[in-house]
Amino acid sequence: MDVQQPDKNDLYRTALTLESLKDRRAAGPLVAALRDENQYRRTGAARTLGRIWRPGPKAALALAECLADRTQPLGTRRMGREALAMLRLMEPFRARNQEEVQRIRADGNATTEDRRWAEWCGG
């Protein structure tokens, strides 16, 4: 995204604004924001994509890639997981995420949110 917002609070408010609009036209720039250098912009983009009505297959693929990318911060990957679940698009990606499911199940410090997602995704 070409908007300069270094402050994470500004980025969060922008994501909430886009989220409230639920405009599918925002999906393209949000997909691009998943690769932004600013981790807060990536996290906000992942969250917002899950709340836009039918953002499209490119958004689903970008979210799945975000989820699989270990260089993404944990918060961004969590938002990607949640977004895919909210879009009811996890089914095609379940097999791809089994390693993540196993890691969460084995982690005694995993959050309740992560465990719930792993249970849903892992079947």
Image (cartoon, rainbow, N blue to C red):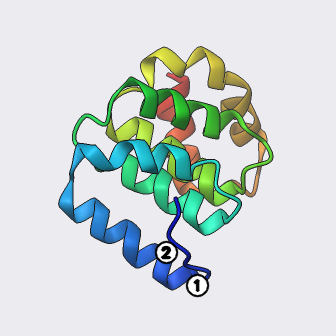
Q: CA distance from mark 1 to mark 2?
A: 6 Å
In the shown orientation, is residue 3 left or right of residue 96? left
- Residue 107 horizontal/vertical position (percent): 77, 47
Would residue 27 be found to the left or right of residue 33 on screen? Answer: left
- Please give the label number shown on residue 7: 1
Asked if residue 62 shows in the view, the reply is yes
Q: Position of residue 2 (x, y in %)?
A: 53, 63
Residue 69 % position (x, y): 73, 38
In this rendered view, identify the residue nearer to me: 57 or 109. 57
Q: Residues within 10 Å of mark 2 (few under 14, many from 20)?
A: many
Q: Are marks 1 and 2 in contact (CB under 8 Å)?
A: yes
Asked which secondary structure carries label 1, the reply is loop
Q: At 62% across and 81% down in the image, what residue appears?
A: 6
Residue 11 numbered tag: 2
Q: Residue placed at 57% from the left, 36% from the top? A: 118
On screen, residue 63 above or below 26: above
Q: Is residue 40 above or below residue 75?
A: below
Viewer-closest of 1 and 56: 1
Q: Amino acid at mark 1?
A: Asp
**Residues packed near mark 1 inside 10 Å, few (<14), some (14 to 19) or many (20 plus):** few
**Which three-letter amino acid code belongs to the residue tagged 2?**
Leu
Q: Is residue 53 left or right of residue 13?
A: left
Quarter where residue 21 is shown: bottom left
Q: Residue at x 53, y 46 (%)?
A: 32
Can residue 50 be seen? no
